[in-house]
Image (spheres, rainbow, N blue to C red):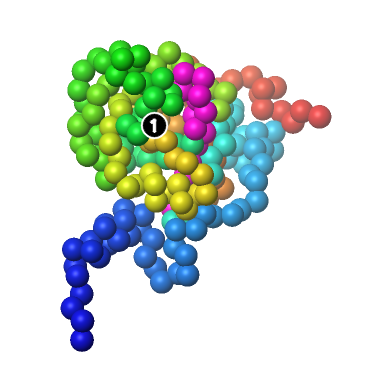
Amino acid sequence: MSRIDLRRMLPLVVLCVILSGCEGQDNPFASSQSAKVQYRPGEAGTVDHALCLLGFVHVPIRNVRPGHQLVEARINGVVGDFLLDTGANVTVVSAVHAERFGLSQAAGGVLGAGVARIAGASGAGRQVRVDSFTLGDIDIRQRRVLVADLGPLLETLGDAAGREVYGIIGQDVMNDHRAVIDVARPMLHMRRDDSDPAPVASARCEPRG
């Protein structure tokens, strides 16, 4: 009987833990294919309507099995898919994609070192300034992101989604814009301005025909 090489199995075990995807499925990393979610702010009794009346705006997100969501971001005018990660303390652009978004060390303006508390990240990174940053049609007020090595995590998620994943949207952005995630649908709701949720004119959330 041949011996099992645990060292060669370790990367697979780590990825299964990170993605919580080793459940005996034929392809546990396959992308979740669900119908396009309809935003319904004009339909009373829905989460969309309730959050709209409190001044939230929706941002489309996409489920990737198992249990992850991708959101489209535009940084310095360049569009890319990012992992929405409530467990990450900061927003990170993968070091291998930094130049794509104009965040090379020469052009990005290094502001100092930072630390990313993210599963799979190398830990240390460099903080750089961004000129523009949007999620959907929401202008993100934050003007600094971390550039760091995210290891194999994004590559594996990219394989699952069938597209490149360029980084992570962390708690810094979500906290700043009071993000609410409707995981089941999926849908992301955020505030544009820096204020507490408060009632808005009901006409804003009425059906438009």
Q: Please state the horizontal and vertical placement of residue 108, each as a whole percent of the image.
A: 34, 16
Residue type highlighted by circle 1: His
> Quick check: 201 above or below 15?
above
Which of the 4 quarters of the picture holds residue 57?
top right
In percent of the image, x 39 and y 16: which residue is there? 130
Q: Nearer the viewer, residue 90 or 39?
A: 90
> Quick check: 62 above or below 196?
below
Can residue 51 be seen here?
no
- Magenta segment main secondary structure: strand
In percent of the image, x 62 and y 41: which residue is there? 46
Left or right for 25, reference 117: right
Which of the 4 quarters of the picture holds residue 121?
top left
In percent of the image, x 54 and y 55: which residue is there? 32
Mark 1, residues whose alpha carbon is within 10 Å: few (<14), some, or many (≥20)? some
**Picture quarter with the N terminus:** bottom left
Q: Is residue 82 magenta?
A: no
Q: Please state the horizontal and vertical placement of residue 35, each as a whole percent of the image.
A: 65, 51
Left or right for 109, reference 193: left
Q: Nearer the viewer, residue 209 or 46?
A: 209
Q: Nearer the viewer, residue 31 or 190?
A: 31
User: What residue is pinned by disc 1?
Assistant: 97
Can residue 6 be seen here?
yes
Q: Please state the horizontal and vertical placement of residue 207, each as a whole percent of the image.
A: 74, 31
In percent of the image, x 27 and y 21: which residue is there? 127
Left or right for 164, reference 176: right
**Picture quarter with the C terminus:** top right
Residue reaching furthest bottom?
1
Q: Secondary structure at mark 1?
A: helix
Magenta residues, as a range? 67-80
Q: Please state the horizontal and vertical placement of residue 50, each as a whole percent of the image.
A: 58, 34
Left or right for 90, reference 73: left
